[in-house]
Structure formats: C-alpha cells, structure tokens
Image: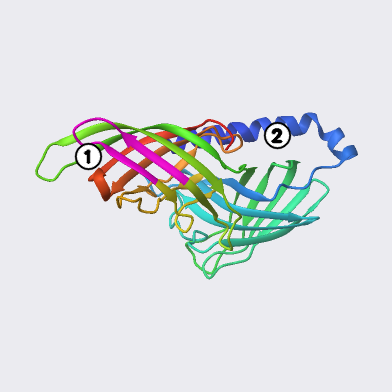
Amino acid sequence: MRRSFIILFLALALTVAMSACGSSRSSSSGGVPSLTSGNWLWIATSNTYNTTNPTPLRQYTYFRGSLTASGSTVSAAMQIVQQNFSPPFCYSSVTPGVLTGSVDGNNLTLTLPATTLAGTLTITATVNSANSFLGTYSTSAGTSVSCPEDSGTVYGIYVPPISNNWTGTLSSTQIVIGGPTLKYTYAATASVTQEAANAQGVFPLSGTLTFQTNDPPNSCFISAAIDDTQSFIQGEQVMIVTTPDVNGAQIVFSSTPYANLNNPATPTQIGNISYNTVGGNCFYSFGSGSLTLTTQP
C-alpha cells in the first residue's frame, strides 16, 4: 500500500514538472499564484540508500501538516516522519517541525533549524502552481554521527479540505464472549467537517458518523458525533474517533497504520481503514474498509 502510494505521488510530481516546463514563459510573464494556505503533504526522496539491510532501501522523509502563505512569507508546522533511515529519528518528532521561508517569483526557500541531533534542513523549490512545488533539499551534518549530510528531491502538494459526505462499507469480525466469532458487513456514512489547523499543524475533524448492520442475531447500530479532540487529518492521513452514542457505543479508527486518502490532490476515497467498536450493543468488533466521496454537505 505504501509503495503504491509513493509511486502515485511521484507520478504526480513528474506530471507537474512536465507541465511547469511547458508553461515557464506564461508563468514568468503572468506571475505565479501564491501558495494555498492549508493542509499539505511533502515527500522528500533521498539520493542515498539505507545499506544496513541485505537489500538497500530508498530513504524517504514525509512532511504532513499546515502551510501558511502571506505575501512572500511562508511558514509550515509539519509532522516529520523518516522511512528507511537508520536511525529514523534525526528529524522525526511528535511535536511539529516549524519551517520558515519565502517565495520570490516562483522560487521557494524553506528552512528547518538544526535539532539537538540533526543539522539544518533547507528546501529550494520551484512553485509550479498555487497547489504544488517541486525541488531539492539538503541537510547539513548534525551533532550526532547518526545524522550525516543528506540531499535529494522534494515534492509538495496541497490537500484540499475533506469537508463532505462519505459513504462506504466496512467488513467486520465480531467477538462474542462465550460464543462464535461473527463476520458482518456494515454500512457507514460520515458527514465530515474539517476545522482550522491548530498550533501542531493538525486539522481537527468534526461531524457525525453512522454505522449499522441488520444481520441477525447481533445487529449493531452506532450514530455518534465525531470527536474533534481526537479526530483529525494531517497530510493524507485520517483519524476518526466518535464520542459514545446513547447506547455507549463508540468507533475508533486505527493509527497503525492510519487511514489515508487515495489521491491527496483530488481525494475521492478514505481508504486503508482499520477500526474497532467499543461498548453499546456492538460488543467488540474490528475490521477494515473504505469510505467514498458522495455529495457536498
């Protein structure tokens, strides 16, 4: 799943790069739109491989969170996750990495200050449109020998708000204490509102989620509010947790892995959902599935 997502993302980057090459004259004469403020996903691909494994692995860094553009000034609060790095914690952190920089024409620069382990990270990119950029990154050597210099390419894309109605089916395995293990298919409907980003670069989600099956003998129905203190979107990753409904039943999406959008630039599906239900008349069930975009709320 993660490999196919990276391939899709890099294909988008190539498309944008080719488009930018074909429209460079109009961009310079007509100006480049300011970057769209909101939820963004960046993927940085290192020029080096992790060779500690028998098979060398390409190294990636994911930036997910809020970008704010005001005039020529740009800042971003991003969750940073490094994949296939050894060790993986040079820039990865629970608290956001705060990058600052500017746009001059269609030239974007962003800088992440050095951490206690890693050196300064600098992004130099071309703004292809208000919703994307493509360029390179470099890091200076950190104070830790485990965080050496690095460089590579980086592609950033704006993820539009997912405020909308979503419907789908979720398959489930239900465990009944002292009884058989039951398998059901649930119909799910979510009316989602994406709220403004908080200081951590996270966009809380609110709304309602309905989840039901009429399969006897253990029918399950949940209609509950989406808890905006626990539900969020950041980049392409989605977390939904409902408050307990009138019967005490609750739905919790998994974070290992997170549900994610099928195409961050134009999402039509929240996929890779793993979830469980707690309380009420649903006993304990867990399963997987997806939700597909339907209509504007």
The kind of residue on which mark 2 rests is Ala
| Residue labelled with disc 2 | 17
For residue 259, above or below residue 122: above
From the viewer's perspective, tell me whether residue 164 is left or right of residue 126: left
Could you tell me if residue 235 is visible in this image? no
Secondary structure beneath label 1 = strand
The kind of residue on which mark 1 rests is Gln
Magenta run includes residue 82: no
Q: Which mark is residue 267?
A: none
From the viewer's perspective, tell me whether residue 84 is left or right of residue 184: right
Percent across and percent down for residue 113 are: 63, 66
Percent across and percent down for residue 270 are: 47, 37
How many labels were placed on the picture? 2
Instruction: Quadrant for residue 157, please give it.
Output: top right
**Residue interval drawn in magenta:** 208-223
Percent across and percent down for residue 258 are: 42, 46
Percent across and percent down for residue 218 are: 21, 37
Residue at 35 percent across and 47 percent down: it is 251
**Spatial CA span between label 2 and label 1:** 48 Å
Nearest the eye: 238 or 219: 219
Q: Report the predominant secondary structure element of the magenta stretch.
A: strand
Residue at 70 percent across and 34 percent down: it is 17
Q: Residues within 10 Å of mark 2 (few under 14, many from 20)?
A: some
The N terminus lies in quadrant: top left
Magenta run includes residue 216: yes
Nearest the eye: 286 or 54: 286
For residue 296, above or below residue 118: above
The C terminus lies in quadrant: top right
Secondary structure beneath label 2 = helix
From the viewer's perspective, tell me whether residue 259 is left or right of residue 114: left
| Residue labelled with disc 1 | 174
